[in-house]
Amino acid sequence: MASKFSMVGGSGLFGAEDHLEAQDRMGAAMEQLKIREEHEKQQRQVAQIEEQKQLLATLDAQETKFINETVKPEHYENEQLQKKNEEDDDDFEDDFEEDAEFLRLRELRLKQLQEQYRVKQENLAKGHGDYREITQDEFLKEVTSSVRVVVHFYHRDFERCKVIDMHLSKIAKRHIECKFLKLDAEKAPFFVNKLVVRVLPTIIYFKEGIASDDRIIGFEELTQGVGVGKEDEFPTVNLARRLAKIGAIDGAGDELESLNYEAKKSSIQVGYHTEYDSDE
């Protein structure tokens, strides 16, 4: 019996052109699916990055709030108020002289103070407590001999470097936990190039001899709350809070764990004295 079905061109119901068209359609569909999956993947990545940015912004705001509450203007501007607070603390202790729990806590605090005193004496012996100038030959020894070191790279003719000098001299006396130094950029070309210092003033924090990526360039983040035209008159506490944020100094006696932030780009203005850029 003859078959009910006939063969077209001897190759089945569909011709070669039909097969090619079907393959093209399948390939196009697969390509569209691949493009859609890649687009969805990119959208997920963008959403994750945005979520991480929001988390960092929240942590940054919380840390800034804590620093502002613990690093206060009166720490650097009003010595009489500091003395009054110390006297008030003494009066408070007198009221609880006979309390057993208070005596236990005071004994614990006394041990902490003794340890702090020991560390303080060691730091003073290393040059902490003063704001000193060093030379290029002294640089490596100075930044590696203490756990925390702040170095101000300056130019003698830049007025803003002199403003930073004034504030750091105040901060150095209060924060013995960190060593504060200044280095003439013109006389230290090796380390200026090595650390890519391009704008003066620049403040770099070293922890155990390693430079932090988060550096203070010019008056970056120091003039908040200062009127236009009075940027050079920002209060010392603004610089202290910035140093606390990068972990260089403690706030209210408590160690602040700084987050790793990328150094923010500064606006560079060309100086007139040397090839360095001035922040003025």
Image: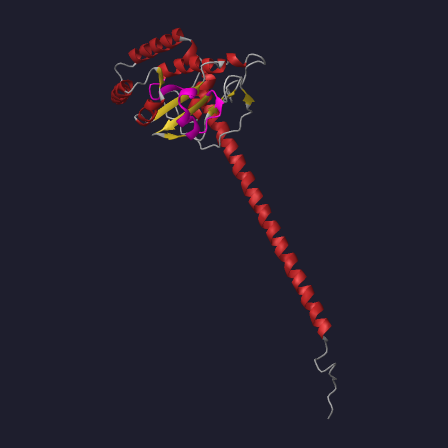
Magenta highlight on residue 185 = yes
Quadrant position of residue 24: bottom right
Which x, y percent locates residue 219?
50, 19
Which x, y percent locates residue 45?
56, 45
Closest to the observer, 227 or 58: 227
Residue 249 seen anywhere in this rendered image of the structure: no
Which x, y percent locates residue 193?
43, 28
Coloration of the structure image: secondary structure
At horizontal 34% and vertical 12% (from top left) the residue drawn is: 89
Residue 121 versus residue 45 in the image, above or below: above
Quadrant position of residue 150: top left
Closest to the observer, 95 or 205: 205
Q: Give the range drawn in magenta.
A: 175-201
Magenta highlight on residue 94 = no
At horizontal 64% and vertical 58% (from top left) the residue drawn is: 31
Residue 10 versus residue 249 in the image, above or below: below
Residue 6 versus residue 228 in the image, above or below: below
At horizontal 41% and vertical 16% (from top left) the residue drawn is: 168
Closest to the observer, 217 or 87: 217
Residue 216 versus residue 52 in the image, above or below: above
Residue 39 seen anywhere in this rendered image of the structure: yes
Q: In this view, does 71 lie to the left or right of 126?
A: right
Quadrant position of residue 77: top left
At horizontal 44% and vertical 25% (from top left) the residue drawn is: 245
Closest to the observer, 184 or 44: 184
